[in-house]
Image: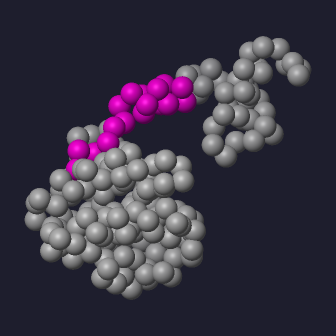
Amino acid sequence: MNLYGGQVNKLIEELEGLPGIGSKSAQRLAFHLIGLPEEKVNRIATTMMEARKNVRYCAQCCTLTDKELCPVCANKNRDHSTIMVVESPRDLAAYEKTGRYEGVYHVLHGAISPMLGIGPNDIRLKELIKRLEGDVNEVIIATNSSLEGETTAMYISKLIKPTGIKVTRIASGVPVGGDLEYIDEVTLYRALEGRTEI
Ligand code: ZN
């Protein structure tokens, strides 16, 4: 239904394509944007384009960053011999919010899912294995407790075991199927503290 003319509809349609934005939110956002001063809209558009252009994977942990190394990997005070494996940069952010993890991370950008046809080569697993050639004492697997997360944890554990590096899994205090991002910091920290060797 073309209520507002092509340009407005086009903007609404583009916004509707974003995750978590339904048609009502898209309309609200579109009207908000149209009502903003032109320089503000320019700034938003430029920020989006620059982020898209400059953001890449950290050369070490594969999280998103605009530098060669992300701030965690670049920090010499972190314990680089402990690697926590997470599914997404959002999970990394959730653990960083606890402020109590001193190791570094590895971001897989997904999880193994035979049902969706996502195999080990479709996530950043090769990069993790490469890192194990360095000085690594422990790999903490903090993938989600969904079926995919558990499958991935098992797969990684089997892969690492022969190297003799300690492999642990965060405690099941994290609700099944829970998205790490939505779990409070205390629960996350407890899950980390209560990790067990697998
Ligand atoms: Zn990094």
Tell which residue pokes out farthest to the top in this image.
6
Residue 96 at x, y percent in the picture: 39, 64
Inspect this view and state whether residue 103 appears: no
Quarter of the figure with the N terminus: top right
Residue placed at 43% from the left, 81% from the top?
A: 171
Whether the magenta-drawn stretch holds residue 13 is answered as no
What sort of colour scheme is used for the picture?
one colour
Work out whether 5 lies above or below 168.
Answer: above
Residue placed at 43% from the left, 56% from the top?
A: 112
Q: Which residues are magenta?
A: 43-61
Residue 85 versus residue 46: which sits nearer the camera?
A: 85
Residue placed at 25% from the left, 50% from the top?
A: 126
Q: Is residue 147 left or right of residue 192?
A: right
Q: Is residue 98 left or right of residue 124?
A: right
Residue 92 versus residue 100: which sits nearer the camera?
A: 92
Work out whether 175 lies above or below 17.
Answer: below
Residue 109 at x, y percent in the picture: 41, 50
Q: Looking at the magenta stretch, what is its main secondary structure?
A: helix
Give the image quarter of residue 14: top right
